[in-house]
Amino acid sequence: MENSNSMHACDHSRRRFIQQSAFLSAGVILAKPAQLLATANEQGTRAYNIKSKGYAGKDEHGKLALWNFERRAVGDNDVLIEIKYCGICHSDIHTIRGHWGKQQYPQVPGHEIAGVVTAVGKNVTKFKVGDKAGVGCMVNSCMQCESCKKGEEHHCETMGFTGTYGSPEKSSPSGISQGGYSNNIVVKDHFAIKIPDNIDLQHAAPLLCAGITTYSPMMQYQIKKGDKVGVVGIGGLGHMAIKIAVSKGAEVYAFTTSSSKVSDCKGFGAKEVIVVDGADKLKSWFGKLDYMISTVPYAYDMSNYISCVKPYGYFTQVGQPINGELTINNFNMIFNRVNFNGSLIGGIPETQEVMDYCAKNKIHPQIQIIKAEEINDAWEKVVNKQARYRYVIDAATF
């Protein structure tokens, strides 16, 4: 006769076998089935939501705090990614603090996600368990409109793209998408980026926002060797803009209000660094640059910066201020003849392109690895221009 311990072990093993078999029959290949939690869905069948934990904002004014939540089950076209690193973007701060509109809480921010695939749906061929993968600023779109078909999913013409966090998402148990300040994420395979073996995950993470957001408009402009390119605002995005433009052979001029960043900018490859400590500092630069990109995430006196571009050149604003509001003096514009435009991240093909390009050319962001408990402090340092230059969270500390 079996003793009670062996019977208990047998029952435990049988339950685990049944659970795994049921999940595999649904067409999902798993690396860590113990991560799953069985819950009932609306149809009364068994759906295996994913246990997750991360740091969430609970309101506009408070600090982020640890939150245990669930993600949707892994669908036929989904991948489950165990997050290893997630970058901190100023957009995270703007969103959670309500700078771009009212939010639903609790909300986990983070859209510079790098990790390892631990499960794939039955239709997935792009990834296999064990692959390195990343998620950037969006996790869904209609995939049917002309923009989506052209690889510009971020300009989806029907439903609009679903942001990685804070967007209404019916499949999410919390009702909204939840981001990368967490230990895992479930995402459609189309919206996951392949991370090459020759780039570390902690360096790959910031490329999924800071990298693509600066790369995309500069590639649209087609910057080339010898172009004089100005970069305004040298933070997480700005330092990547310098590195990418330099790699294309451009002469880069960095404009910053922080004198402490001069040597860093030169180390990134800038030919000259202009410390802007007054409006008059810019006048000698009027009409000198072929192209200029600004990453400043707040409203600022931008007219004199725009005038630094040659007539009929282009000035791109990628930093997004509170409520998107900028003030441009049109008298300046009609006399400087500069083309002003904004730019929004990039599509999935272009995001894969910048990932591959930076991996191949060893273009790495300058990062500081932090623990989850340091997130709130890091946010304050980002706001106070103290980041050097991208904080990246070690997800093992959640």
Image (tube, helix red, strand yellow):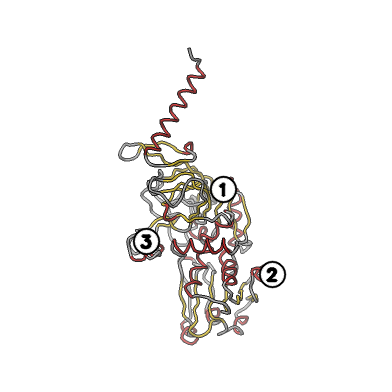
Identify the residue under disc 3. 160
Residue depicted at x 63% and y 72%:
257
Vertical side of 78 occupied by 301: above or below: below
Q: Secondary structure at mark 2?
A: helix
Tell me which amino acid carries mark 2: Ser
Tell me which amino acid carries mark 1: Ala
CA distance separating discs 1 and 3? 29 Å
Vertical side of 114 occupied by 47: above or below: above
Count the labels in the image. Answer: 3
Number of residues whose C-alpha sits closer than 10 Å to that of mark 3, classed few (under 14), some (14–19) or many (20 or more): some
CA distance separating discs 2 and 1? 31 Å
Q: Position of residue 388 (x, y in %)?
A: 64, 62
Q: Position of residue 317 (x, y in %)?
A: 50, 72
Q: Position of residue 304 (x, y in %)?
A: 55, 80
Which of the marked residues, 2 or 3, is nearer the chain's N terminus? 3
Q: Secondary structure at mark 3?
A: loop
Residue ranking furthest to the left: 43
Q: Which mark is residue 395?
A: 1
Which of the marked residues, 2 or 1, is nearer the chain's N terminus? 2
Q: Quadrant of the C terminus?
A: top right
